[in-house]
Amino acid sequence: MLYVVGDMEDLKAHARFHASYLSPEIKVSRWQNQVILEDFFDGSRVIEISLADRMGLQLYTKVASFMNRDLGQDCPQGGVNTIPHLPSYMRIFIFIEGEKKTAVGCCIAEELTSTTVAQRGYQIRRLVGGLRSLLSWRVQNPLAVWTEPVEGSNNNSNIDRITFPLCGIRRLWVASKHRRRGVGTVLVESLLKHLVYLTHLPRSNVAFAEPTASGAEFAVRFVGREDFIVY
Protein backbone atom coordinates (compact mmCIF):
# COMPACT_ATOMS: atom_id res chain seq x y z
CA MET A 1 0.00 0.00 0.00
CA LEU A 2 1.37 3.42 -1.01
CA TYR A 3 1.52 6.00 1.80
CA VAL A 4 1.14 9.62 0.68
CA VAL A 5 2.62 12.19 3.06
CA GLY A 6 0.10 14.92 3.85
CA ASP A 7 -2.92 12.98 2.62
CA MET A 8 -5.59 13.23 5.35
CA GLU A 9 -6.97 9.72 4.82
CA ASP A 10 -3.49 8.21 4.96
CA LEU A 11 -2.68 10.22 8.09
CA LYS A 12 -5.86 8.99 9.79
CA ALA A 13 -5.17 5.39 8.76
CA HIS A 14 -1.61 5.67 10.09
CA ALA A 15 -2.85 7.15 13.39
CA ARG A 16 -5.37 4.31 13.79
CA PHE A 17 -2.69 1.68 13.13
CA HIS A 18 -0.27 3.39 15.53
CA ALA A 19 -2.91 3.51 18.27
CA SER A 20 -3.92 -0.12 17.76
CA TYR A 21 -0.26 -1.19 18.05
CA LEU A 22 0.62 0.82 21.15
CA SER A 23 -2.75 0.73 22.92
CA PRO A 24 -4.57 -2.47 21.95
CA GLU A 25 -8.21 -2.80 22.90
CA ILE A 26 -9.32 -6.35 23.61
CA LYS A 27 -13.04 -6.25 24.32
CA VAL A 28 -14.26 -8.77 26.90
CA SER A 29 -17.93 -9.49 27.47
CA ARG A 30 -19.44 -11.53 30.27
CA TRP A 31 -20.03 -15.08 29.10
CA GLN A 32 -21.78 -18.00 30.71
CA ASN A 33 -19.79 -19.71 33.50
CA GLN A 34 -17.16 -16.95 33.49
CA VAL A 35 -15.07 -17.28 36.65
CA ILE A 36 -15.15 -13.82 38.27
CA LEU A 37 -12.79 -13.54 41.23
CA GLU A 38 -13.17 -9.81 41.92
CA ASP A 39 -16.02 -7.50 40.84
CA PHE A 40 -15.54 -3.80 41.60
CA PHE A 41 -18.01 -0.92 41.80
CA ASP A 42 -16.53 0.83 38.75
CA GLY A 43 -17.32 -2.19 36.57
CA SER A 44 -13.77 -3.54 36.43
CA ARG A 45 -13.17 -7.14 37.38
CA VAL A 46 -10.59 -9.89 37.69
CA ILE A 47 -11.42 -13.19 36.01
CA GLU A 48 -9.67 -16.54 35.75
CA ILE A 49 -9.68 -18.28 32.38
CA SER A 50 -8.87 -21.78 31.20
CA LEU A 51 -7.36 -22.73 27.84
CA ALA A 52 -9.68 -25.74 27.84
CA ASP A 53 -12.60 -23.31 27.48
CA ARG A 54 -13.25 -21.93 23.98
CA MET A 55 -13.92 -18.38 25.16
CA GLY A 56 -10.94 -18.47 27.50
CA LEU A 57 -8.64 -19.71 24.72
CA GLN A 58 -9.80 -16.98 22.34
CA LEU A 59 -9.23 -14.28 24.96
CA TYR A 60 -5.81 -15.54 25.99
CA THR A 61 -4.68 -15.86 22.36
CA LYS A 62 -5.37 -12.14 21.86
CA VAL A 63 -3.82 -11.08 25.15
CA ALA A 64 -0.75 -13.28 24.67
CA SER A 65 0.10 -11.65 21.33
CA PHE A 66 0.54 -8.25 23.01
CA MET A 67 2.02 -9.70 26.18
CA ASN A 68 4.70 -11.57 24.21
CA ARG A 69 5.54 -8.43 22.24
CA ASP A 70 5.85 -6.16 25.29
CA LEU A 71 7.81 -8.67 27.40
CA GLY A 72 10.29 -9.39 24.63
CA GLN A 73 9.07 -12.83 23.57
CA ASP A 74 7.73 -12.12 20.10
CA CYS A 75 6.57 -14.95 17.91
CA PRO A 76 7.43 -14.49 14.21
CA GLN A 77 4.48 -13.72 11.98
CA GLY A 78 3.24 -16.72 10.11
CA GLY A 79 4.66 -19.09 12.70
CA VAL A 80 3.27 -22.60 12.66
CA ASN A 81 2.43 -22.72 16.35
CA THR A 82 -0.15 -19.92 16.70
CA ILE A 83 -2.21 -21.55 19.47
CA PRO A 84 -0.77 -20.80 22.93
CA HIS A 85 0.13 -23.73 25.15
CA LEU A 86 0.73 -23.67 28.89
CA PRO A 87 1.26 -26.49 31.39
CA SER A 88 -1.94 -27.51 33.15
CA TYR A 89 -0.66 -26.26 36.51
CA MET A 90 -0.39 -22.68 35.20
CA ARG A 91 -3.34 -20.41 36.04
CA ILE A 92 -4.31 -17.33 34.03
CA PHE A 93 -5.81 -14.21 35.58
CA ILE A 94 -7.10 -11.27 33.51
CA PHE A 95 -7.90 -7.72 34.66
CA ILE A 96 -10.76 -6.08 32.76
CA GLU A 97 -11.17 -2.33 33.18
CA GLY A 98 -14.70 -1.09 33.75
CA GLU A 99 -15.15 1.82 31.34
CA LYS A 100 -14.47 0.16 27.98
CA LYS A 101 -14.66 -3.47 29.16
CA THR A 102 -11.22 -4.24 27.78
CA ALA A 103 -8.50 -6.59 29.02
CA VAL A 104 -5.61 -4.44 30.23
CA GLY A 105 -3.69 -6.84 32.48
CA CYS A 106 -2.73 -10.50 32.64
CA CYS A 107 -0.89 -12.63 35.16
CA ILE A 108 0.23 -16.24 34.72
CA ALA A 109 0.92 -17.89 38.05
CA GLU A 110 1.50 -21.21 39.74
CA GLU A 111 1.40 -22.54 43.28
CA LEU A 112 4.86 -23.46 44.51
CA THR A 113 5.38 -26.04 47.23
CA SER A 114 8.54 -27.88 48.22
CA THR A 115 7.26 -30.86 46.18
CA THR A 116 6.41 -28.95 42.99
CA VAL A 117 9.68 -27.02 43.13
CA ALA A 118 11.62 -30.30 43.19
CA GLN A 119 9.45 -31.90 40.48
CA ARG A 120 9.78 -28.93 38.08
CA GLY A 121 13.47 -28.41 38.71
CA TYR A 122 13.15 -24.86 40.04
CA GLN A 123 15.71 -23.08 42.17
CA ILE A 124 14.22 -20.77 44.78
CA ARG A 125 16.40 -17.97 46.14
CA ARG A 126 16.39 -14.38 47.25
CA LEU A 127 17.72 -11.69 44.92
CA VAL A 128 21.04 -11.03 46.62
CA GLY A 129 22.22 -7.54 45.70
CA GLY A 130 18.72 -6.25 44.97
CA LEU A 131 17.70 -4.54 41.73
CA ARG A 132 21.25 -3.71 40.72
CA SER A 133 22.13 -7.39 40.50
CA LEU A 134 19.68 -7.83 37.60
CA LEU A 135 21.22 -7.39 34.14
CA SER A 136 17.88 -6.20 32.72
CA TRP A 137 17.73 -3.44 35.35
CA ARG A 138 21.34 -2.33 34.79
CA VAL A 139 20.75 -2.09 31.03
CA GLN A 140 17.87 0.33 31.59
CA ASN A 141 19.79 2.19 34.32
CA PRO A 142 23.34 2.42 32.91
CA LEU A 143 24.40 5.20 35.31
CA ALA A 144 23.59 3.15 38.40
CA VAL A 145 26.61 1.96 40.38
CA TRP A 146 26.64 -1.74 41.19
CA THR A 147 29.12 -3.73 43.25
CA GLU A 148 29.38 -7.50 42.91
CA PRO A 149 28.23 -9.13 46.17
CA VAL A 150 31.08 -10.70 48.13
CA GLU A 151 30.87 -14.48 48.14
CA GLY A 152 29.68 -15.72 51.48
CA SER A 153 28.29 -12.34 52.52
CA ASN A 154 24.71 -13.54 52.13
CA ASN A 155 23.15 -14.36 55.47
CA ASN A 156 21.85 -17.90 55.62
CA SER A 157 18.82 -16.62 57.50
CA ASN A 158 17.53 -15.35 54.15
CA ILE A 159 16.94 -18.95 53.10
CA ASP A 160 15.08 -19.70 56.32
CA ARG A 161 12.63 -16.89 55.65
CA ILE A 162 11.34 -18.53 52.48
CA THR A 163 8.29 -20.52 53.53
CA PHE A 164 5.90 -22.53 51.39
CA PRO A 165 3.49 -22.36 49.70
CA LEU A 166 4.56 -19.54 47.41
CA CYS A 167 2.67 -17.65 44.73
CA GLY A 168 4.91 -18.04 41.70
CA ILE A 169 4.43 -15.35 39.06
CA ARG A 170 5.67 -16.52 35.70
CA ARG A 171 4.49 -13.52 33.69
CA LEU A 172 2.86 -10.22 34.63
CA TRP A 173 1.70 -7.80 31.93
CA VAL A 174 -0.20 -4.52 31.96
CA ALA A 175 -1.11 -2.55 28.82
CA SER A 176 1.11 0.52 28.44
CA LYS A 177 -1.68 3.10 28.91
CA HIS A 178 -2.75 1.49 32.19
CA ARG A 179 0.60 1.07 33.92
CA ARG A 180 1.24 2.67 37.31
CA ARG A 181 -2.50 2.73 37.99
CA GLY A 182 -2.61 -0.22 40.36
CA VAL A 183 -3.64 -2.87 37.82
CA GLY A 184 -0.68 -5.13 38.58
CA THR A 185 -1.23 -4.73 42.32
CA VAL A 186 -4.91 -5.69 42.04
CA LEU A 187 -4.02 -8.75 39.95
CA VAL A 188 -1.38 -10.05 42.36
CA GLU A 189 -3.55 -9.30 45.41
CA SER A 190 -6.30 -11.38 43.79
CA LEU A 191 -3.78 -14.17 43.22
CA LEU A 192 -2.83 -14.20 46.87
CA LYS A 193 -6.47 -14.69 47.84
CA HIS A 194 -7.43 -17.31 45.27
CA LEU A 195 -4.34 -19.27 44.23
CA VAL A 196 -4.29 -21.62 47.23
CA TYR A 197 -7.63 -22.99 48.38
CA LEU A 198 -8.89 -21.38 51.62
CA THR A 199 -5.57 -19.59 52.11
CA HIS A 200 -4.76 -15.89 51.83
CA LEU A 201 -1.02 -15.75 51.21
CA PRO A 202 0.99 -12.75 52.48
CA ARG A 203 2.88 -10.48 50.11
CA SER A 204 6.13 -11.93 51.41
CA ASN A 205 5.20 -15.27 49.80
CA VAL A 206 5.36 -14.05 46.21
CA ALA A 207 8.15 -15.33 43.92
CA PHE A 208 8.95 -13.82 40.52
CA ALA A 209 10.36 -15.73 37.55
CA GLU A 210 12.85 -13.86 35.34
CA PRO A 211 11.51 -10.35 36.07
CA THR A 212 12.14 -7.53 33.61
CA ALA A 213 13.53 -4.23 34.91
CA SER A 214 10.01 -2.83 35.30
CA GLY A 215 8.83 -6.10 36.82
CA ALA A 216 11.64 -6.03 39.37
CA GLU A 217 10.74 -2.47 40.38
CA PHE A 218 7.13 -3.57 40.81
CA ALA A 219 8.27 -6.54 42.92
CA VAL A 220 10.23 -4.25 45.26
CA ARG A 221 7.23 -1.95 45.72
CA PHE A 222 4.82 -4.85 46.22
CA VAL A 223 6.92 -6.99 48.56
CA GLY A 224 8.60 -4.08 50.33
CA ARG A 225 12.18 -5.34 50.05
CA GLU A 226 14.82 -5.51 47.32
CA ASP A 227 15.86 -9.09 48.03
CA PHE A 228 12.52 -10.48 46.88
CA ILE A 229 12.17 -14.16 45.98
CA VAL A 230 13.04 -15.28 42.44
CA TYR A 231 13.03 -18.66 40.73
Image (cartoon, grey):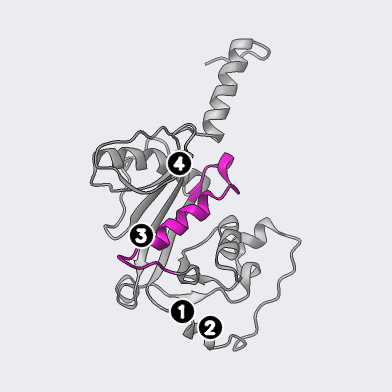
For the residues labelled 1 and 2, the Cα–Cα distance comes to 7 Å
Q: Earlier in the sequence, mark 2 or mark 3?
A: 2
Residue 57 covered by magenta stretch = no
Q: Amino acid at mark 4?
A: Ser
Separation of residues labelled 4 and 1 (CA atoms): 33 Å
Dot in front, 2 or 3 = 3
Residue 38, how many percent across, how many down?
40, 49
**Left or right relative to 118: residue 41:** right
Relative image position of residue 45 (x, y in whole percent): 42, 44
Q: Secondary structure at mark 1?
A: loop
> Mark 2 or mark 4, which has the lower sequence index?
4
Residue where numbered disc 4 is placed = 44
First in sequence: mark 4 vs mark 3: 4
Amino acid type at circle 1 is Ile
Q: Which mark is residue 158?
A: 2
| Mark 3 vs mark 1, CA separation in Å | 20 Å
Residue indicated by mark 3: 194
Instruction: Sort mark 2 into few (<14), some (14-19) or many (20+) by Cα contacts within 10 Å.
Output: some
